[in-house]
Image (cartoon, rainbow, N blue to C red):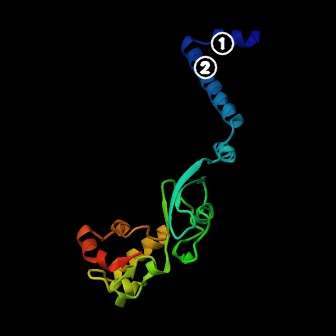
Amino acid sequence: MQKILQWLNALDSKKRKQLYLAGGLVAILLGVLLSNSSAPKVQDAIVQQSENFTVSGEVYIHVVGEVVEPGLYELSYGSRVRDVIDAAGGFTDSAVQSSVNLARLVSDGEQVVILAESQMATDSSLGFISLNRASSSQLESLPGIGPALAGRILAYRDEIGSFASIEQLLEVTGIGSKLFEEIKGSITL
């Protein structure tokens, strides 16, 4: 060690400063490299967080129509329409079970509507087209509804499971209040 110190003292001040600077940079670089190798990987941290993360809580669902006990129900987060029907005592005898997607997850504040056969009319000769059961061609029989708009209505219906009210049709792109006013007397759930 003595010989190294003597050698350093023998160097001119400019060379000594350069050597100290280089040594400091090497020390910093080694420190950074060593600290990163001992740190947990970001992906490992994300996996560990997701294993510890659980979503819980309750959701409130309003179920109406053809169930034994319509009303407001508190269910666990992650419940499905089937759970809502069970909580409401099950379907009535006049319920059309296919009017809802029983496997669909419910969300807080949602209203689930269970229809009766009389509400499921799709025969345009009766004057009503069911938003929840109509085919593309039946929807196209409505004034102002062409193939493209009928397709958007069907896609929206598939996305939400079923229409809860005819006013929900206004959420379909291309259905404005003027068109809705023109067809609302011809549609049902």
For the residue pair 175 and 4, the one nearer the viewer reads as 175
Residue lying at 76% horizontally and 9% vertically, measured from the top left = 2
> Which image quarter is the C terminus in?
bottom left
Residue type indicated by callout 1: Leu
Is 33 situated above or below 113? above
Is 156 situated above or below 44? below
Residue lying at 48% horizontally and 73% vertically, measured from the top left = 158
> How many C-alpha atoms fall within 10 Å of the one at disc 1: few (<14), some, or many (≥20)?
some
For the residue pair 136 and 184, the one nearer the viewer reads as 184
- Residue 9: image location, x then y, percent: 65, 9
Where disc 2 sits, the SS reads helix
Q: Is residue 6 left or right of residue 77?
A: right
Pointers 1 and 2 in contact (C-beta within 8 Å): yes
Q: Which label number is shown at residue 19?
A: 2
Upstream in sequence: badge 1 or badge 2: 1
Q: Residue furthest left?
A: 178
Residue type indicated by callout 2: Leu
Is 187 situated above or below 159? below
The residue where tag 1 is placed is: 8
Residue lying at 38% horizontally and 87% vertically, measured from the top left = 137
Q: Is residue 46 left or right of residue 148?
A: right
- Residue 56: image location, x then y, percent: 62, 47
Q: Using the rendered view, name the quadrant where residue 42 is placed.
A: top right
Where disc 1 sits, the SS reads helix
Q: Using the rendered view, name the quadrant where residue 151 is placed.
A: bottom left
> Which image quarter is the N terminus in?
top right
> How many C-alpha atoms fall within 10 Å of the one at disc 2: few (<14), some, or many (≥20)?
some
What's the distance in space between the residues labelled 1 and 2, CA to CA? 9 Å
Q: Residue furthest bottom?
A: 125
Q: Is residue 151 left or right of residue 39?
A: left
